[in-house]
Structure formats: C-alpha cells, structure tokens
Image (cartoon, rainbow, N blue to C red):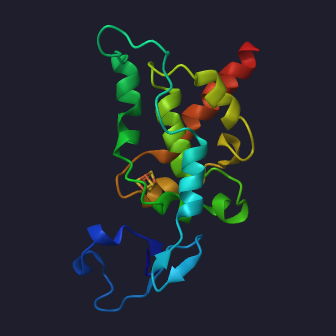
Amino acid sequence: MLINGRVELACQKLVRDFKTGNNFVIEPLPLFTVLKDLVVDLEPFFEKYRQVRPYLIAGQEPPESERLQDPEKQRLIDPALRCILCAACTASCPISRVNPDYLGPAALLRAFRYVFDSRDEATDSRLGQLDTEDGAWGCKTMWSCTEVCPKQIPVTKCIGRIKRALKAGQTAR
Ligand code: SF4
C-alpha cells in the first residue's frame, strides 16, 4: 500500500521504521482499481504475469535424471527468484501509469528469470514477445521499481539484461 506517499510492503513495516511519529497517511496501492478500503483489484497485474508464460518450457521428453541448470545462469537469475509478486514495483512504475498495455516490471522480471534459464527452450519466442514498446523497450530506466522492491531485487538491471539480449539478437540478425 501507499504509506506517506511511498509504496511499501505494509506487512514488513513497523511504526518505528518511519520518522513521522504517529502521523501516517495510508492509501491503497496506486495504479489499480480500488475494490474497498485498502483492497485493490490485482487481476490486471496477474494477467500481465500470465502473458509472459511464467513457467519452464523444456523439451517434450524428460531426461533420465533432473534437468541441470548452468551454475552461472543460476547465479544470474537468483535475485529474481526472491520475487513475492507484491506488485509494489509495478504500482510505482511511471510507465505503467501512462501505458496500460506495458507489461510492467514484475512481469518483465519473471520473463528475465526464464530467458536466462539454461534449461528453458523458448528463449527466442520469449525475446520476440518482449521486443516491443509494451515489453522490455517500454522500460525507460527510471529505477522506481528497484527503489521500492521490498526484496532488494535489482529489477531495472534485470530488465536491462533483457534489452541487451534483444540488442545482441538484432546485431546477429
Ligand atoms: S520485483 Fe520486488 S516489488 Fe516487484 S513484485 Fe517482485 S518483490 Fe514485489
């Protein structure tokens, strides 16, 4: 929710974390439709999340043993695995506020997690989906998502990695 004008994960905050004494202005999460009091409709948020296919797309035939991940790729995507889908990043994103079709930082972060997973076999198709102004190029590197993320995920940098992968693909073409 919005506490004193800043998006915060309320369940992780204590009154003493704020320097405002007992003066608080508590409002619903911005961007989303208010259903009642502080409750907002997060369905549009999860719809964007579903659009990026938030699951591993691997070969049809399972291997004899587990599918092994490249350790370097695992280190790269590890921070993204901390995401709890709280929607704070998307709610604070200036682009999401002006472009309702923009995927938004949380969905892009989930896409990043699979684009750079060495076991995933839909990389080209995922990057193709993200290569638009409503996808990765919608991000104008304003850092709001990174500033508010309660899990300290470098969201903006992760989106930047997607852009670099797209650029590299364009150069290869
Ligand atoms: S990236 Fe951070 S702010 Fe965004 S949904 Fe995940 S945990 Fe919340």
Mark yes or no: residue 157 visible.
no
Name the spot of residue 171 as percent of width and height, x first.
73, 18
Q: Quadrant of the N terminus?
A: bottom left
Q: Quadrant of the C terminus?
A: top right
Farthest residue, direction front: 61
* 38 relative to 35 in the view: left or right: left
Rendered position, 89 above or below 33: above
In the rendered image, residue 126, in percent from the top left (x then y), is placed at: 62, 30
Task: Using residue 135 as the reference point, say whether residue 46 is left or right of it.
Answer: left
**Closest to the observer, 43 or 83:** 43
Q: Residue furthest bottom?
A: 23
**Residue 164 location, x and y as percent?**
62, 29
Relative to residue 148, is residue 84 depicted above or below?
Answer: above
The residue under the point 25% across, 81% down is 15
Instruction: Tell me which image quadrant ligand 1 sits in.
Output: bottom left
78 over 62 or under it: above or below: below
Q: Residue at x 72, y 59 (%)?
A: 99
Residue 121 falls left or right of residue 102: left
Residue ID at (54%, 65%): 91
Q: Position of residue 122 (x, y in %)?
A: 58, 23
Residue 6 visible to an observer of this rendering:
yes
Q: Residue at 70% across / 60% down in the picture?
A: 100
Disc tally is: 0
